[in-house]
Image (spheres, grey):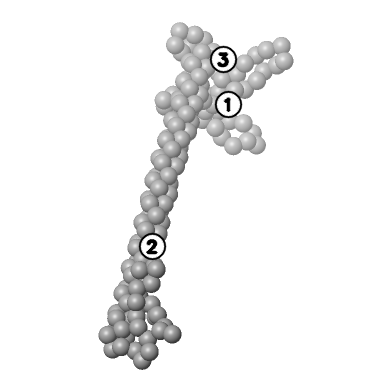
Amino acid sequence: MELNGERNRCIYLLKSRGMAHSNQVREFLMSKNGIRLLPVYVGNGAVLTGSARLSQEARDRADNLLRQQTKEEKRRVLDGKRKALEAQIEAMRSELAQEEARVALVTQQEEQRERDISQDMLEMVSFRAGGAGQRKAMGQNGRVGDVHEG
C-alpha cells in the first residue's frame, strides 16, 4: 500500500474460518522475529500506516500532554483562588471578632456607668433626706459615702 510517498505492508482478510469477519486493513511488520500485526490506527478518518502513523501518534501524544498540562494549570489556579478566598474569609472573621469584642467592652462600660449613676442617685436621695445620725460626704475616691459622726 502506498501512502504519503512510502510503501507499507498491509493485509486484508476477506474471510477466516471460525473467526468474526473484519473489514479492516492491518499493517504488518516482518522482522527476524517473524511477522507482527500492528493494531489498527485510524486518525482523521483514515487508516494510517508507516511514518504517517508514527507522526500522528506523536501529535496525539503531544496533544494529550498539552491537555493534561492545561488541566493541571487550571486546577492550580483554582486552588490558588480558593486559598485566597479562604484567607479573605478568615480576615473578615477576625475583624468581626475584634468588632464584637469592642462592642461587648463598650456595652459593659455603659452598663457599669449606668449602675454607678443609679447608685449615686440613691445616695443623693438618701443624703437629702438626711439620715438619723449620718451624713453623706465625698470620700477619697470621689464617690459619695457614709461618714459616721462619733
In the image shown, does 80 or 104 lie closer to the viewer? Answer: 104
Answer whether residue 116 is visible to the viewer in this image.
no
**Residue 9, labelled with which disc?**
3
Give percent across and percent down for residue 140: 39, 68
Residue located 44% across and 32% down the image = 73
Residue located 31% across and 74% down the image = 117
In the image shown, does 43 or 69 lie closer to the viewer? Answer: 69
Answer whether residue 17 is visible to the viewer in this image.
yes
Residue 111: quarter of image = bottom left
Of pointers 3 and 1, the one earlier in the residue sequence: 3
Of pointers 2 and 1, the one earlier in the residue sequence: 1
What is the distance, in whole Å, between disc 2 and disc 1 at their CAs? 79 Å
Amino acid on which the number 1 mark rests in the picture: Pro
Amino acid on which the number 2 mark rests in the picture: Leu
Residue 143: quarter of image = bottom left
Q: Nearer the viewer, mark 3 or mark 1?
A: 1
Q: Residues within 10 Å of mark 1 (few under 14, many from 20)?
A: few
SS class of the residue under badge 2?
helix
> Which residue has dot 2 on it?
105
Q: Is residue 129 above or below residue 138?
A: below
